[in-house]
Image (cartoon, rainbow, N blue to C red):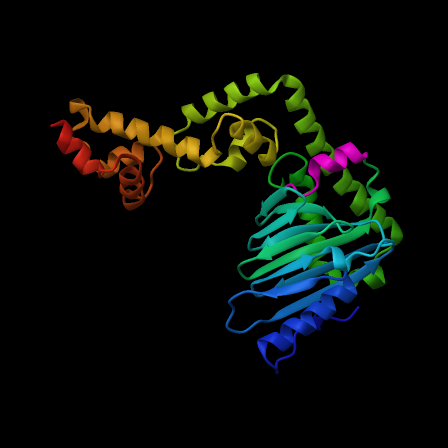
């Protein structure tokens, strides 16, 4: 298939319309929604390898939406998978929202409405194939659909270089690829997704209360690490970020909200300790994971109604 690019002439609206037509012809019918962009440009490189359609899309910020009016009653039972290569995207389907960054992938059902919001310049590998090629149960698919899957750990470290290689060679795959390659690609993806579904199932079998306690202890022991993140916490407990968010939500928290609240409480305690008066206010924040003193001061004042310096002065 030839490389498709937006024309150099015409208005942004005209380029968006042509881009919508190109993507709808190559993938599935959908709508392209504009975002603020001075000069919209996009390109698509695609190949049909056996029963799998592969494409690499590079574009300026925009959003896509597949609505019920785009989905016929006899629409093929296809799944799409997007591996973010550059930039971030937010995939929304059913009641789930998946934020996908570089080196992460997300799978979604083309027979159900979805949106993919791409708020920055981006590039991604998009694969489209029939549901039955995955050889996964409906329950397993339900666990992983519209859920970010990291390729930075576990089996993902094996899958990632393979998919990145496909993205680099996509223009040559139609002439050199074979149906056997297509089967291998989907088998590997299915194994990764089944592992992720199994990890969440094993975590649920352990019991949410015990797992939640282990997660809270893990986060408390690492409050001083500026790199403490949902991705790292989920990976350490071999669960998905979606399941991590669910566990913390049942306790009335978001992950970032719990971390921020605990960090600020420890900073407030240290500011009230005369033995730590020799430490600058910024160093107190740094001890508990606030790498940016200005951000620390702003967060502290928002939580307690006074700046860290004012809190220390009030104690004195």
Quadrant of the drawing holding the C terminus: top left
Which is more toward the observer, 201 or 169? Answer: 201
Is residue 139 inside the magenta stretch? yes
Q: Residue at x 87, y 55 (%)?
A: 50
Nearest the eye: 264 or 187: 264
Could you tell me which residue is drawn at 69 percent across and 68 percent down? 20
Residue 45: horizontal and vertical position, in percent?
Answer: 72, 65
Q: Quadrant of residue 210?
A: top right
Question: Is the magenta region chiefly helix, strand or loop?
Answer: helix
Quarter of the image where the N terminus is located: bottom right
Closer-to-camera residue (195/10): 10
Q: Is residue 243 above or below residue 57?
A: above
Closer-to-camera residue (151/89): 89
In the rendered image, residue 271, in percent from the top left (x then y), is placed at 21, 29
In this rendering, does residue 5 appear at all?
Answer: no
Q: Is residue 29 above or below residue 202?
A: below
What's the residue at 69%, 60% (across, down)? 56
């Amino acid at each position: 298939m030839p490389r498709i690019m937006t024309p150099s002439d015409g208005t942004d609206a005209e380029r968006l319309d042509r881009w919508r037509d190109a993507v709808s012809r190559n993938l599935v019918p959908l709508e392209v929604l504009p975002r603020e962009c001075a000069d919209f440009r996009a390109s698509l490189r695609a190949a049909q390898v056996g029963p799998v359609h592969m494409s690499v899309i590079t574009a300026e910020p925009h959003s896509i939406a597949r609505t019920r009016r785009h989905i016929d009653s006899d629409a093929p039972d296809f799944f799409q998978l997007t591996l973010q290569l550059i930039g971030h995207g937010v995939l929304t389907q059913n009641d789930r929202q998946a934020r996908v960054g570089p080196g992460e992938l997300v799978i979604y059902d083309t027979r159900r409405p979805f949106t993919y919001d791409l708020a920055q310049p981006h590039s991604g590998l998009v694969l489209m194939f029939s549901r039955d090629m995955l050889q996964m149960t409906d329950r397993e698919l339900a666990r992983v659909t519209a859920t970010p899957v990291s390729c930075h750990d576990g089996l993902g470290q094996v899958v990632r270089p393979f998919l990145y290689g496909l993205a680099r060679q996509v223009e040559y795959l139609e002439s050199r690829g074979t149906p056997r390659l297509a089967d291998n690609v989907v088998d590997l993806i299915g194994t990764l997704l089944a592992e992720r579904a199994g990890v969440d199932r094993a975590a649920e079998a352990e019991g949410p209360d015990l797992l939640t306690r282990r997660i809270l202890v893990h986060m408390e022991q690492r409050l001083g690490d500026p790199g403490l993140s949902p991705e790292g916490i989920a990976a350490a407990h071999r669960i998905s970020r979606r399941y991590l968010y669910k566990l913390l939500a049942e306790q009335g928290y978001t992950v970032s909200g719990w971390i921020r609240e605990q960090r600020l409480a420890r900073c407030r305690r240290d500011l009230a300790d005369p033995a730590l008066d020799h430490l600058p206010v910024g160093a107190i924040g740094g001890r508990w994971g606030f790498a940016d003193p200005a951000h620390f001061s702003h967060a502290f004042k928002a939580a307690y109604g006074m700046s860290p310096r004012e809190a220390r002065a009030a104690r004195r």
